[in-house]
Image (tube, rainbow, N blue to C red):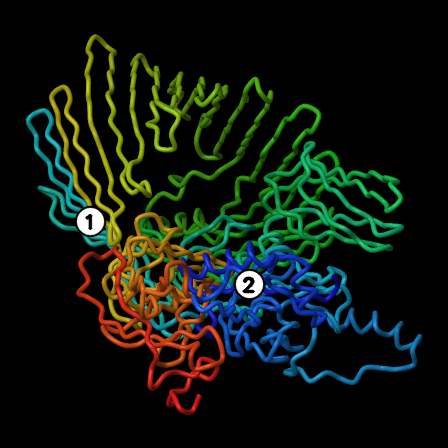
Amino acid sequence: MKGSLRYYPAARTDERSGAFRLRRVAIIAMFAFAVLGGVQPTSAQAAEAMEGDVPVEFDSMFLRVDSGAAVDVTRFARGNPVKPGVYSVDLLVNGIRVARQDVRFVETSPQAGARPCLTHRLLETLGVDFAKLAASNDAKVVATGTAEADPDPDECISLAAKIPAATVDFDFTEQKLLLSVPQKFMRNTARGYVPPDMWQDGVNAAFVSYNANTYYSRGSGVQSTQNYLGLNAGVNLGSWHFRHQSSVTQQSGTGTNFDDIATYLQHDLGALKSQVIVGDGFTTGDVFDSVQFRGAQIATDDRMLPESLRGYAPVVRGIAESNARVTVRQNGQVIYETTVSPGAFEINDLYPTGYGGNLDVTVTEADGRKKNFTVAYASVAQSLRPGITRFSVTAGQLRSSTLETKPNFAQFTLQRGLTNLVTLYGGGVASTGYVAAQMGTALNTKFGAFSADVTGAQTQVPNQGTSRGTSLRVGYSKFIDPTNTNIAIAAYRYSTAGYMDLSDAASVRDLALRGGDPASVYRERNRFQLTLNQSFKKYGTVFLNASAQQYWNRNGSDVFYQAGYTKAFKSGTYSITAGRTRSSNGVMSDQIMLGATLPLGRGQQAPLMATNLSSSGGNANMQTSVSGALGERSQYSYNAYGTYSTGHGSSTGNAGVSGAYRAPYAQLTGSASAGTGSNQASAGVSGSIVAHPGGVTFSQTVSDTFGVIEAPGAAGASVSSAPGVKLDRRGYAVVPYLTPYGMNTVDIDPKGTSTDVEFESTSEQAVPRFGSVVMIRYKTVTGRAALIRAPLLGDKALPFGADVVDANGLGVGVVAQDSRIFARRLEDSGALFVKWGVSDAERCKIDYVLPKKAAKDAYLSVEAHCVPANETVDIDSGALVGANEH
């Protein structure tokens, strides 16, 4: 049925309904109506009855009071009506959750109940493209000669009347509003796109993260104790974020040392998709090598892009002759599929897949015809998608603990993806006595991805003249489909004798100014790196890593290469690795390692045993460990190990244990070991203290971006997405890590809370900016809960399914079997009112007094009677009226 509005079963009828814990009685009542009356609330039948205003008939022969009168069930004749009001709902468009917000429900007719007010403005924010809809309507205008007036952006509109084939479904029990809109009337947005107007600045907050540990060791008659405290502090004011990192180390015999690691201010610029840092930081390593600085920087932040636009992936373009299905495969696996309209199409939101692998594209036309073509896909670090730009601007002082004279410098870099084939990049650096410039390009071809750049530099060495040189860098990457061979990166760099990068130039100038020998700073001549992976599928994988480096002012070369084989068997793995290292002075070292892992069981928390054998420089070593996790949420972890070493005529052994407990408000660690002539013990604690608008909360160690949960009265509830995190006695908890600029869904598990607390929702979403602290608020209703049995006088049963409200006219449920009512938000004493018809004889009042609660998780059971009342509640309006006024 087109344009239908379907309602799912409602557990309650007041506007604050939609609680996570559904009333058991309400569920039973709705089930009874479904069985006895043939109700199909989630089917097209109910929708058609409501849409076409055709009432559903119920067989209520089993729903009668002792007098024989039938129970009034006419309110369910057109589905499960919703009362007008504002409801906090999850908005899902075409199956994807896009927001949670308050939506006003307006009454269309007393029989049909209220419907969501969908405005032109709201639908636009949800991604409906009214320009496409207008273009579609233009054809109707030509055919009919009538045009629509400009819409009022805040006027309630009928989605079915506005958009052909659109539907609206409302799931009352889950408080979900589900919109289905044909894709051709939706805006073309990349997968994972979150509108910038949803990005949250967060609240003013402050935090201190700490990592404290103490380490004791004794060996060869010498005892040593070391204490360490690492601090990471932050203050958020508006959209500016202050951060400070430092550490204090105290070791027996050496005193105390304080290390100021970094202090800076951070702020994002959404319009430029970049971050501003003022203080201590690192330059980006996209073009020039990364260095530490103290100053200011503006640099692109790819996290502000949708996930499907981060990294490199080619744009797939083609032409469809009909409404066709486009399937994109990589290495035989389907990675993307969509339906396109006739004409040219473009797919520009493929998720990046490592270093690529050619894309096989199949276009299946409506009549079954298929067209196939291939799009080359290989990338190097510098590759960008067509139309994507990265930049950075840095100015400040070079930070290095080895320099006495720290030069000022400025750096600019720019990268731009031009086409699937070409990315251009370059930049410049200017410093005291130093200048450099670079230009380069990255190419994506069917033979693989190439990058090549050239850098020219000039260094003024005090008292020694000027040194000039160039550096050529070439990179290559390719995934060879037929053989499953991945050349992840092959890079070669050659520099002339006079070339120096910024760090080397600063070191040379610093030594020259202090009368030192600039030749003691080694200047690189050649550098080569290779990483190769060869998959044999079920027969395992072979890998090779190799690197070599030579210098202009030092003989010899540094060489490293390593090869290995790994394979999985059933639920375990084994591997063999061989490597050789040779330093420039000719010293060579060989190493061979054998390793295997095996789960000791089949459960999710089964321990994992790992064994490693290694041989290096005439020494042999064997280590075996057993590790795992315990607890309902794997909050406990442990590791036990033993080692045995032999070589050069002697042998040693060692055994130890370590463990960690991820507590709600901190993490505790400990370890101990003993061996031949030595022993060790350590203990540590880490966590964070967060000050926010609701007070101060202790938590596990937080990341740069995190959230604070506020759920009044919900002490003891757990945060599903953060193992070990629970709400404190005030109803607060810290979610220690959130993804910036992305849609974060935070779920609460109510298990452990008081039965007197009701969540209106246990799932909320947050879209924090980088560095922000967001409040994630959950609406709760606090009040006593009880199972009340209240038959009529003479122990006659109350009518099954009758409405029950409190003294304020708010619905608390319906009557179930044996005159039982499950009710929440009760006072210690009060009255409830029951209605099953229109006359005074079909109403009664329950006076109750709740006993003292005995157990936290037990529901109270109360016995009472429902008696005629001189004063009762008009259930339809919620007003108190006298009996003679009914």
| Label 1 – label 2 distance at C-alpha | 69 Å
Q: 172 or 401: which is nearer to us?
A: 172
- Residue at figure coordinates x 83%, y 71% from the top left: 135
Q: Quadrant of residue 96?
A: bottom right
Q: Is residue 650 left or right of residue 785?
A: left
- Residue at figure coordinates x 70%, y 75% from the top left: 158
Q: Quadrant of the N terminus?
A: bottom right
Q: 409 or 14: which is nearer to us?
A: 14
Q: Amino acid at mark 1?
A: Ala
* Residue farthest along the left direction in this orientation: 221
Find residue 510 and report its horizontal and vertical position in percent: 36, 52
Residue 60 in sight here: yes
Residue 742 in sight here: no
Q: Neighbour class for label 1 at 10 Å: few (<14), some, many (≥20)?
A: some
Q: What numbered label is drawn on residue 212?
A: 1
Q: Quadrant of the C terminus?
A: bottom left
Q: Which residue is mark 2?
A: 60
Image position of 553 with respect to 675: above or below: below
Label 2 SS: loop
Q: Quadrant of residue 354?
A: top right
Q: Is residue 819 left or right of residue 120?
A: left
Image position of 260 with respect to 369: above or below: below
- Residue at figure coordinates x 45%, y 28% from the top left: 558
Q: Amino acid at mark 2?
A: Ser
Label 1 SS: strand
